[in-house]
Image (cartoon, rainbow, N blue to C red):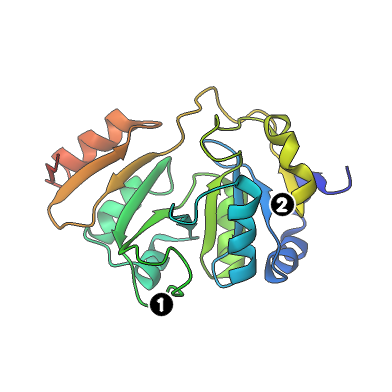
Amino acid sequence: MSNIITLNEALSSIDKIKTILENDGVIAVPTDTIYGLAALVRNERAIKRIYEIKGRSFLKPLAISVGTVNDISKWSVPTISNEHLNELLPGPVTLMFPRQTTLPDYFNPSVQNVAVRIPDYTFMIELAQRLNEPIALTSANISDSISSLTIDEFESLWPKIDLIIDGGLLTKDRTGSTIVDLSVKQQYHIQRYGVDNERIIKYLKNDCHLTERK
C-alpha cells in the first residue's frame, strides 16, 4: 500500500510526516514498546479521528509524547526534578502529572492529569523535536484488544490511517510502557505494570525517595 513506508524512509521524510500531521492526519508509529497511533494535540479533528479509528470511548484519555524532558513542564506540572526525569526518560515509562492549562480543553476533557511519554526510539524523538509541540499517542489497535508488535497486527485499521511507518517486529512484550501516576508529590502509584517495571519502581523508591500510594 502507498501509505506504508519503512522506518528508514520515515527518518528521511520527517518534513513530509510533519505536513501530514499538521493537516489533521493520523499516523501509525513504532515506539520502544508497541505500535501507536499519533496525531497533533492541537488538531481537534485528528484527536476525534483517533477515537473513531480505535472505537475507543471518549472518556478514556490519550497520552502525549514530547521530544525532551524540558518539554514536559510546558504541558504538565512535574512533581520530580529534571534530574530524575532524565534518568527515567527516554524510556518505556509513561509518567502522569497534573495537566497544564496550555493543553486544549477538548483534549482529555475533565481529566486533571496528563500521561507523558518520551519513547526511547530515535524516530519518535526526532519527530517530536521537529514538531516542537505535543503528539497525542495511544496504542495502534481496536480498543481493548491486544497490542500490536507488527503493522500486520492492526491491518484492519490501515484504510483509516494516513501513514503507517513499518519498524518491523518491535519487541516480544505486549504489555506496553509502565504507567506511573506521579500526580501527588512524594508519592507514586503504578497504574499499569509494563516493560522494565522492576527497574522503574526501584528508581522511584531508592533514588527519588517516593513512597507507594496504593
* Coordinates of residue 108 in the picture (x, y in percent): 43, 63
- Who's the residue at 76% across and 43% down the image? 158
In-image side of 89 versus 204 (left or right): right
Q: Quadrant of the N terminus?
A: top right
Q: Earlier in the sequence, mark 1 or mark 2?
A: 2
Residue 11, numbered circle? 2
- Who's the residue at 76% across and 55% down the image? 162
In-image side of 172 versus 115 (left or right): right
Q: Secondary structure at mark 2?
A: helix
Q: Secondary structure at mark 1?
A: loop
Q: Quadrant of residue 73?
A: bottom left
| Furthest residue in direction right, as rendered | 2
Tag in front: 1 or 2: 1
Residue 30, numbered circle? none
- Who's the residue at 54% across and 61% down the image? 135
Q: Quadrant of the C terminus?
A: top left
Q: Amino acid at mark 2?
A: Leu
* Coordinates of residue 52 in the picture (x, y in percent): 63, 53
* Coordinates of residue 130 in the picture (x, y in percent): 61, 66
Whether residue 114 is visible, yes or no, is: yes
The residue to which callout 1 is attached is 102
Whether residue 6 is visible, yes or no, is: no
State the CA–CA distance, disc 1 to disc 2.
29 Å
Q: Amino acid at mark 1?
A: Thr
